[in-house]
Image: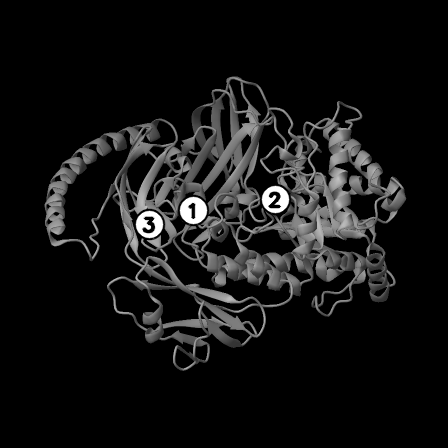
């Protein structure tokens, strides 16, 4: 079977191209373009799957090999199931941290490498292509390549010399990826040059190692595996310079950030999300694929999957996956699903969300259709009416609609008028059982693609109950009554945003809260409270039905109290209970008024303290109308720059310096989790996270972190820039006794006072 595959790949490549000259390949549609050898190879790998959090995991408390990050040992049956599910390739991330000897040889642990190779062989036995890489080393020792005394590059060369030699006689179905998500020290331009050097160095090592490595396919990433134009252009220049037909480009894609994590009210697959997908994929295709280079998206999914698989509403997530699969197919880009154990079970080999996998699988072949929403809500006590939804057919036609018991009758149970489908009230009355939750599932069947499910849900207004707890353990009892949480806001009494990501009232979903519909609870995460000042605020819970339920909270140090703002009485409650509740409401109003009066006094004191603190430290302003405030934890500082100026402020000239002390003298790592610019005019919001640059500077008394945005071409007169950051020691230990001292703001080289 493997030999047949080799013959097929060779014949396809030979038939399509006789000479490889990247510079002469024109930009034409992917469907019309003759395929080069690297494109034929990449196409043969479609679709692909990642064996994530396995051989790339490591434990600083003692290496536990492939089980370091919680996944079980890989079995031969798992690899068999990957092939059985329809995948044609497997990416096997490999991390050497804690698994090499000392300089200058940096010998890889032979037992670990042998075990890794065993799984590689299992994959080859299943007729899968295999991608081998150096993975989490990229944000460990390898990030120092190009900025140290040459030790990191020497280590990189030693590791790839060993890997190339070890696998040199493996068949051509094994390809090498030079480095996962490369990141280095320095400006964007400096890091891009270092990435070029890394790719070229690895290329030379592999090609000189002999065996099948003379022509083995080598996969090269953009800097950060990002799709930005400058990074794509750099990788194209490298591949063109090497003039080798067996080179593939790779990038990663996790969708538009706001949609992927459910923040800022971005909850649906709308035109903005679609346009963002188009722009990212077009940059990669136009810069690489259209010029004859095979392209692989080595990882894709949604960022929110890591915190909660339900971060994005199911139907909207499926629409996104359908379109992403379709559009990348149009551009001949091979897609490899990132799976760290949250999608396919490593023990029973079932999908945690079968609907998700079914949609992904359908996208391999063509387009699928869907309706406006995957839910129809019927509220208790309200008259049941016809429900109309719009069809997005994507070239298909509607064949039928079925529930669990029968096929619905066109003209009787539903009607179709152009792209509008109407489910009749008479049908809905028959299937609604007055039991909260999904009463029936309507399966829309189309001429091709995946079936689309619409859930008919019976519900009532959710009830949230009072609760007390701590910032590390605060759980609200919730009677969801058949409804599902879509997003939520956190605001103070004036409607201003509180908590993390305070540039928006709508908070990141899984990072801040987790609903449990089985146990009727809602956990507010410690992340939320750590970045929320003491005092009173309100959570606004937005449900899919359209209902919004408010919930008042007070945080005081480690203590948290939650109070329901409304009392809901079910229709079947007895009359005498209603009277009792009315009296309780009156008593509660009196108590609430007293509490609110006291809260107002306490809040005034706290506000005065905050203002005094701002005057003393980070609240400095100038006539130009610019100020900076630092909040959050000392090792996870949040910087908020407010601009209200008569003249435009050039963000590329803005510098933030965060001064701090710590007990240890270890080197530090920095991440900007998010940087967002909120504006009072269109485009309203812009993400600049990838443009934030950081440098740690040692002073006579401690350190400061300097943040700049030299490549941001934006001028602002009115807006708020929020940068959410993290710091940790380079060896991943916690920073010892980090104490924030002050934050300074500079503009065009001068301090803002």
- The residue at the point 61 percent across, 29 percent down is 59
Q: Tell me where residue 383 appears, x and y as whole percent.
A: 26, 69
Q: Which residue does the image show at 74% across and 60% down from the upper left?
A: 291
Q: On the image, numbered disc 3 is attached to which residue? A: 541
Does label 3 or label 2 sit earlier along the sequence?
A: 2
Give SS at disc 1.
helix
Foreground of the two, 382 or 638: 382
Q: Residue at x 33, y 28 (%)?
A: 558
In the image, farthest residue toward the right: 210
Q: In which quarter of the view is residue 61 placed? A: top right
Asked which secondary structure carries label 3, the reply is strand
Marks 1/3 in contact by CB < 8 Å: the verdict is no
Whether residues under marks 3 and 2 lie with C-beta atoms below 8 angstroms apart, the answer is no
Question: Badge 2, how many Cα within 10 Å: few under 14, some, many 20+?
Answer: many
Determine whether, in the image, residue 99 is placed left or right of residue 636: right
Can you identify the residue that label 2 sits on? 346
- Residue count near mark 3 (Cα–Cα under 10 Å), binned few <14, some 14–19, many ≥20: some
Residue at the image position 13 percent from the left and 51 percent from the top: 578
Number of the front mark, 3 or 2? 2
The residue beneath circle 1 is: 509
């Amino acid at each position: 079977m493997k030999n047949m595959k080799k013959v097929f790949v060779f014949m396809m490549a030979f038939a399509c191209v006789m000479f490889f000259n990247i510079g002469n390949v024109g930009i034409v549609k992917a469907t019309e373009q003759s395929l080069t050898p690297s494109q034929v190879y990449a196409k043969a790998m479609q679709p692909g799957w990642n064996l994530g959090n396995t051989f790339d995991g490591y434990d600083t408390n003692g290496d536990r090999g492939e089980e370091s990050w919680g996944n079980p040992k890989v079995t031969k049956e798992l690899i068999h199931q990957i092939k059985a599910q329809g995948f044609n390739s497997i990416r096997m991330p490999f991390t050497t941290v804690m698994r090499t000897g000392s300089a200058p040889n940096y010998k890889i642990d032979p037992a670990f490498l042998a075990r890794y190779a065993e799984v590689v062989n299992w994959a080859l036995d299943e007729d899968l292509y295999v991608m081998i890489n150096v993975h989490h080393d990229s944000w460990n020792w390898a990030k120092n390549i190009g900025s140290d005394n040459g030790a990191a590059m020497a280590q990189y060369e030693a590791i790839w010399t060993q890997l190339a030699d070890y696998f040199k006689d493996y068949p051509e179905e094994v390809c090498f990826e030079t480095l996962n998500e490369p990141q280095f020290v320095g400006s964007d331009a400096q890091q891009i040059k270092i990435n070029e050097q890394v790719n070229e160095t690895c290329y030379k090592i592999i090609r000189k190692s002999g065996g099948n490595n003379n022509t083995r396919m080598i996969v090269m990433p953009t800097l950060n595996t990002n799709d930005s134009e400058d990074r794509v252009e750099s990788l194209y220049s490298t591949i063109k310079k090497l003039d080798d037909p067996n080179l593939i480009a790779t990038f990663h894609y996790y969708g538009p950030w706001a949609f992927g994590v459910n923040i800022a009210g971005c909850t649906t697959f709308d035109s903005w999300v679609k346009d963002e997908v188009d722009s990212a994929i077009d940059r990669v295709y136009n810069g690489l694929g259209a010029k004859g280079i095979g392209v692989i998206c080595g990882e894709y999914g949604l960022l929110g999957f890591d915190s909660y698989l339900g971060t994005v509403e199911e139907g909207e997530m499926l629409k996104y996956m359908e379109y992403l699969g379709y559009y990348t197919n149009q551009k001949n880009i091979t897609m490899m699903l990132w799976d760290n154990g949250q999608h396919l079970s490593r023990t029973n080999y079932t999908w945690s969300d079968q609907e998700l996998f079914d949609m992904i699988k359908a996208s391999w072949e063509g387009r699928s259709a869907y309706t406006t929403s995957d839910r129809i809500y019927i509220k208790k006590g309200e008259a049941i009416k016809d429900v109309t939804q719009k069809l997005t057919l994507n070239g298909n036609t509607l064949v039928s609609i079925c529930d669990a018991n029968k096929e619905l009758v066109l003209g009787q149970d539903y009607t179709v008028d152009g792209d509008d489908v109407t489910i009749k009230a008479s049908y809905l009355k028959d299937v609604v059982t007055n039991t909260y939750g999904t009463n029936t599932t309507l399966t829309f069947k189309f001429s091709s693609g995946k079936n689309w499910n619409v859930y008919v849900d019976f519900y009532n207004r959710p009830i949230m109950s009072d609760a007390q707890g701590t910032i590390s353990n605060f759980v609200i009892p919730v009677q969801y009554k058949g409804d599902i949480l879509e997003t939520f806001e956190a605001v103070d009494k004036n409607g201003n945003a509180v908590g993390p990501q305070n540039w928006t009232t709508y908070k990141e979903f899984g990072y801040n809260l987790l609903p449990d519909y089985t146990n009727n609870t809602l956990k507010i995460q410690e992340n939320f409270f750590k970045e929320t000042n003491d005092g009173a605020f309100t959570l606004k819970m937005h449900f899919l039905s359209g209902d919004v339920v408010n919930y008042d909270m007070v945080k005081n140090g480690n203590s948290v109290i939650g109070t329901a703002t409304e009392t809901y009485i079910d229709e079947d409650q007895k009359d005498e209970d209603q009277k009792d509740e009315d009296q309780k409401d009156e008593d509660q109003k009196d108590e609430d008024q007293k509490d609110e009066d006291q809260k107002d006094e306490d809040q005034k004191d706290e506000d005065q303290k905050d203002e005094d603190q701002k005057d003393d430290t980070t609240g400095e302003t100038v006539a130009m109308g610019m100020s900076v405030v630092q909040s959050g934890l000392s090792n996870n500082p949040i910087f908020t720059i407010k601009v209200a100026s008569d003249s435009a402020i050039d963000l590329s000239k803005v510098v933030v310096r965060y001064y701090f002390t710590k007990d240890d003298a270890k080197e530090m790592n920095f991440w900007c989790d998010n940087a967002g610019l909120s504006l009072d005019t269109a485009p309203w919001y812009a993400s600049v996270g990838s443009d934030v640059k950081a440098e740690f500077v040692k002073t006579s008394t401690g350190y400061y972190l300097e943040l700049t945005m030299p490549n941001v071409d934006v001028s602002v007169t009115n807006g708020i820039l929020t940068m959410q950051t993290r710091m940790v020691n380079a060896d991943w230990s916690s920073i010892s006794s980090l104490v924030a001292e002050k934050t300074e703001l500079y503009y065009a080289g001068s301090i803002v006072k």
